[in-house]
Amino acid sequence: MGVWDEHNEHLRLAVIRAVDTLIKTTDARPSMSKLEFEALVTLLVQQYGQVAVASALIALESGRLEAGARDLPAPVPAEPVNIDQTRSTVSWAINQADGDFPTAARRLAGPVGRMVRQAARDTVWESTRVAGTGYVRVPGPRACAFCLMLASRGAVYAKDTVLAVGKKAKRPEGARYHDNCSCSAREVLSDADVPQIVKDLEAEWYEATYTGRGPVADQAAAWREHIKRTRPTRRSARFIMEVPADDPRPALTDKAIRHILDGEPDNPRQGGHRAGTSRRRKTEFPPSWSDADIIDSVQETFDDPHSSIYIGDRRVLRRIVQRHGSRVIVEAQYYVPDEATGTPIFRTAYPKSGDAVYRNTKDGTRLIEPFDEKGMESKR
């Protein structure tokens, strides 16, 4: 895993922990005052924003060291929290939730994640601006047409823009991010360092929005149509959808992630789906999938399933996910023990079938579990 991939993983975990702590603390103390709630959100954004900044600084320094770029100005850490922005966002969430703090905490899941990640993104932008190096936006696994458009801009250099100089310099268009956006910022020291996905998007942009006579009249509309035509639809109408789209979903906590990847340490019959874990009666994700690939695929399944069914008290969500040339049906399960509060509890997540998916039998034999679309609606 490269330094920037490690940085992205640190950010993902920081966001999960910040949101998980916010929800659990508020659920435990639903009658806290508005000032206490505001202070809690601010503290969490600051705490995990500092983690995000530290991770970005390490990625910048490590990337430069690997490239032999030792004469650049030192990276510039961003402020981990914007107090005014946090306060206004908290007020918005409280109003949206009619003063109910547990509901407001859930409303803040997206904004808190954005603010934590923004501390790292600002650190990368300020550092590249001061050093005169390039800034690229790398799209996340579920990037929307808008994010893909911004990523298609390629490497941005402050010297090539009309931005003001100084600590408060305006960000380029490519540095705009929305709630629940997993796009990341990265420094590039030369055009050769631009990630291939960004190069591909640059080529796509010109193919989709230019003709032999120049740009089309409405490039943004042409791009949206291109993305709609060339990317898989976000939801497939072919499969049954029993669970409402707005049904609350569980957070992927550290405990849930451990269950998915390594399994329960005191119970070999529960969890453990990373390739090579060899837990009996368990399936394993393809060997080419990293831990980040696995967890992202589970999060995608919770966020945007292709099918959903009820099996007893369990909500069972499934999604066809593609990574590194392998198609996998990912299944994620949860339940809601108290329908009155609607608090969801993670149960399990694993590869149901797919390319390079293996199943370990009771006697330890390792068998291929080939991709089978019929499993999308199976009641078992």
Image: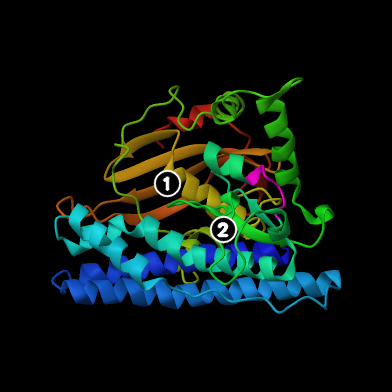
The magenta stretch spans residue 154? yes
Q: Are marks 2 and 1 in contact (CB under 8 Å)?
A: no
Q: For mark 1, what is the residue?
A: 302
Q: Considering the whole magenta stretch, tell me its main secondary structure.
A: loop
Q: Is residue 362 visible?
A: no
Position of the C terminus, as image quadrant, is top left
Helix, strand, or loop for circle 1? Answer: helix
Where in the figure is residue 252, as x and y percent of width and height? Answer: 43, 59
Where in the figure is residue 200, as x and y percent of width and height? Answer: 74, 39
The local crowd at label 2, few if under 14, some if 14 to 19, many if 20 or more residues have their Cα within 10 Å, is some
Three-letter amino acid code at the position of disc 2: Arg
In the rendered image, the vertical position of residue 183 relative to residue 56, given as above or below: above
Where in the figure is residue 259, as x and y percent of width and height? Answer: 48, 62
Helix, strand, or loop for circle 2? Answer: loop
Magenta region, residue range: 151-156
Where in the figure is residue 337, as x and y percent of width and height? Answer: 22, 54
Position of the N terminus, as image quadrant, is bottom right
Q: Nearer the viewer, residue 201 or 320?
A: 201
What residue is at 78 percent from the left and 75 percent from the top? 72
What residue is at 28 percent from the left and 42 percent from the top? 312
Left/right of residue 96 with respect to residue 185 in the rendered view: left
Left/right of residue 306 with respect to residue 67 in the rendered view: left
Which comes before the other along the chain, label 2 or label 1?
2
In the rendered image, the vertical position of residue 13 relative to residue 352, given as above or below: below
**Where, by quadrant of the figure, is residue 347 drawn?**
bottom left
Q: For mark 2, what is the residue?
A: 171
**Where, by quadrant of the figure, is residue 329 drawn?**
top right
